[in-house]
């Protein structure tokens, strides 16, 4: 098993836990926004294990506000982690997996934010929509090739992670100066609501079980919160009927 993370301390803890459980673990500190780091990760993986059969592109951060109020640094940081990391992962590891000629699978983590939209957080939504589109394109490409490598896109809603504290790993050169920040009137209220929903969300172990089940069944779309499927249906109906986008989630400028 290979682990990659930019947070060296968290990476070491995960490595120790898995090793204690009997797994052979290679932990590599990786900045997934850097192509050279992904290439180094692939080289180390091949040197130790000699092959790759399951690739999970799971890095993600939350940040930014609406389209107009998010700074360029917000866009660069979120798109870099949430979308470019998946592009790099697929581009570097995909050819390796194909060349093996063996069964394999790629899982790209998007979000339910990639299946229906709202005004904020715009950079996150754009990145996750991109991951869904990338994954669908890859699925068709591999099917045309007759490849033995499958693809799934994971689109969870609220999962109990530390994504609400993503700023802890934000590069200094992509941090906003105080005067650059534009906060909508109810920003703090919305932040607290999202924080509470994440803290009470699904456990990572539950989501992992859903992912492994989907991989074994060859399922492409992995949805974790069926109670929110109605929102996805509404967006599909908007598209099919030519209706303007329906407002289905609270926006940053909505009255509290």
Image (spheres, rainbow, N blue to C red):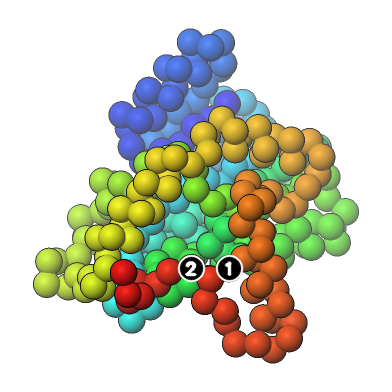
- Residue 110 drawn at (x, y percent): 56, 55
Circle 2 packing at 10 Å, graded few (<14), some (14-19), many (20+), is: few
- Residue 234 drawn at (x, y percent): 66, 72
Whether 149 is drawn above or below 116: the answer is above
Question: Foreground residue, 235 or 154?
Answer: 235
Q: Residue furthest left?
A: 179
What residue lies at 33% left-to-right and 81% top-to-bottom? 68
- Quadrant for residue 145, please give it: bottom right
- Residue 122 drawn at (x, y percent): 42, 71
Residue 116's tag is: 1
Tell me, yes or no, if residue 108 can be seen here.
no
What residue lies at 62% left-to-right and 26% top-to-bottom? 49
Q: Is residue 38 found left or right of 7 in the rendered image?
A: right
Mark 2, secondary structure of its residue: loop
Question: Foreground residue, 245 or 76?
Answer: 245
- Quadrant for residue 237, please give it: bottom right
What residue lies at 26% left-to-right and 73% top-to-bottom? 184
Image quadrant holding the N terminus, namely top right
Q: Earlier in the sequence, mark 2 or mark 1?
A: 1
Q: Residue furthest front?
A: 256
What residue lies at 12% left-to-right and 66% top-to-bottom? 178
CA gap, disc 2 and disc 1: 9 Å
Mark 2–mark 1 CB contact (< 8 Å): yes
Front of the two marks 2 and 1: 2
Mark 1, secondary structure of its residue: loop
Residue tagged 2: 249
């Amino acid at each position: 098993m290979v682990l990659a993370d930019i947070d060296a301390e968290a990476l070491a803890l995960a490595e120790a836990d898995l090793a204690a459980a009997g797994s052979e673990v290679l932990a590599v500190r990786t900045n997934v926004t850097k192509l050279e780091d992904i290439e180094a990760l692939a080289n180390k993986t091949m040197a130790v294990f000699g092959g790759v059969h399951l690739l999970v592109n799971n890095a993600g951060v939350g940040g930014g506000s609406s389209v107009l109020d998010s700074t360029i640094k917000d866009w660069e940081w979120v798109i870099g982690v949430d979308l470019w990391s998946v592009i790099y992962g697929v581009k570097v590891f995909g050819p390796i997996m194909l060349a093996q000629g063996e069964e394999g699978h790629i899982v790209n983590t998007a979000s339910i934010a990639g299946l229906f939209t709202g005004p904020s957080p715009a950079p996150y939504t754009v990145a996750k929509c991109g991951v869904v589109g990338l994954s669908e394109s890859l699925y068709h490409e591999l099917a045309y090739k007759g490849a033995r490598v499958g693809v799934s896109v994971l689109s969870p809603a609220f999962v109990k992670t530390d994504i609400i504290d993503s700023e802890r790993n934000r590069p200094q050169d992509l941090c906003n100066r105080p005067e650059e920040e534009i906060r909508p009137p109810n920003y703090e209220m919305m932040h607290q609501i999202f924080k509470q929903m994440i803290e009470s969300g699904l456990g990572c172990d539950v989501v992992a079980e859903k992912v492994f089940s989907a991989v074994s069944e060859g399922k492409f779309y992995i949805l974790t919160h069926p109670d929110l499927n109605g929102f996805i249906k509404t967006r599909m109906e908007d598209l099919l009927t030519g209706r303007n986008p329906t407002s289905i989630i609270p926006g940053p400028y909505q009255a509290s």
